[in-house]
Image: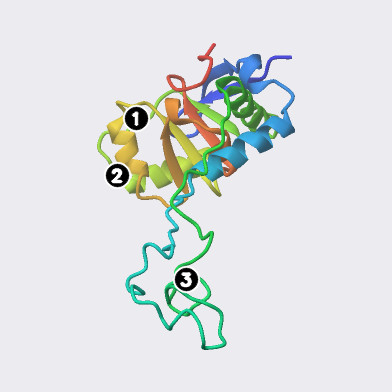
Amino acid sequence: MATTLDLRTQDGSTAGTVTLDDTIFGIEPNMAVLHQVVTAQLAARRSGSANTKTRAEVRGGGAKPFRQKGTGRARQGSTRAPQFTGGGVAHGPKPRSYRQKVNKKMTRLALHSALSDRAHSERVVVIDAWRFDTPRTKDAISALTSLGLDGKVMMVVAANDDTAVRSFRNLSSVQLVEAGELNAYDVLCSDWLVFTSETLPGGAS
């Protein structure tokens, strides 16, 4: 059954209704795919910049520490071998990428699963448009209050909606993303999803 929401205005009043696309907001969330895609997304954020020096990269150790025979000790060729203090590190971390391969079909399914979860929880709000005359954080706070939004809010804005972006961007509880940047992890980290008629996935009907 299609999900129908009130189309809200910036001041909290109702401007009609909007029907969500069932193929995006009405599926049964696939938790296995959702977990795999979110794990891959978090892995891709790792810098992978940890670096240790091998015995070839540590400075010094050019001279043989003591003669080969006659000392009673094990033969050694350099004080920069891993067993010496100040020596190189054996099998230590090197810069690498932690990215995991996830195909587009899985990524799309994970996003639709996350959006459907929020829709089932009645945590999706659609407004007709943001109508700020000038960028003002005070007006943005007033709009959130009128709409009854608290906690973490993900605001999906149009690329050309500069006034709305500048109004909301100083609020720590609001995350601004463009429609093309929607992803499963950020959706799951938000308490509310706010779309405009223009940015609603699947379009407003």
User: Is residue 24 positioned above or below 162 on the image?
Assistant: above
Report how far apart the C-alphas of labels 2 and 1 lie in the structure.
11 Å
- 64 or 12, which is in the foreground? 64
Quadrant assignment, res 18: top right
Which amino acid, by three-letter code, is at mark 1?
Answer: Arg
Q: Say which element carries label 2.
A: loop
Q: Say which element carries label 3.
A: loop
Q: Earlier in the sequence, mark 1 or mark 3?
A: 3
Q: Name the residue at 45% across, 43% down.
A: 175
Q: Name the residue at 53% across, 47% down.
A: 152
Taking the view exactly as shown, the residue that stands out farthest to the bottom is 71
Which amino acid, by three-letter code, is at mark 2?
Answer: Arg
- Mark 3 neighbour class, 10 Å CA radius: few under 14, some 14 to 19, many 20 or more: some
Specify the quadrant that holds the C terminus: top right
Q: Earlier in the sequence, mark 2 or mark 1?
A: 1
Quadrant assignment, res 28: top right
Q: Name the residue at 56% across, 85% down.
A: 73
User: Is residue 16 positioned above or below 66 on the image?
Assistant: above
Q: Say which element carries label 1.
A: loop
- 126 or 38, which is in the foreground? 38
User: Is residue 204 positioned above or below 126 on the image?
Assistant: above
Give the foreground label among 1 and 3: 3
In the shown orientation, is residue 73 left or right of residue 48?
right
In the shown orientation, is residue 50 left or right of residue 121?
left
In percent of width and height, residue 21 lies at: 61, 15
In percent of width and height, residue 131 lies at: 34, 30
* Residue under pointer 3: 81
Task: Name the disc covering residue 131, or none.
Answer: 1
- 175 or 65, which is in the foreground? 65
In percent of width and height, residue 33 lies at: 68, 30
Task: Name the disc covering residue 136, or none.
Answer: 2
Quadrant assignment, res 164: top left
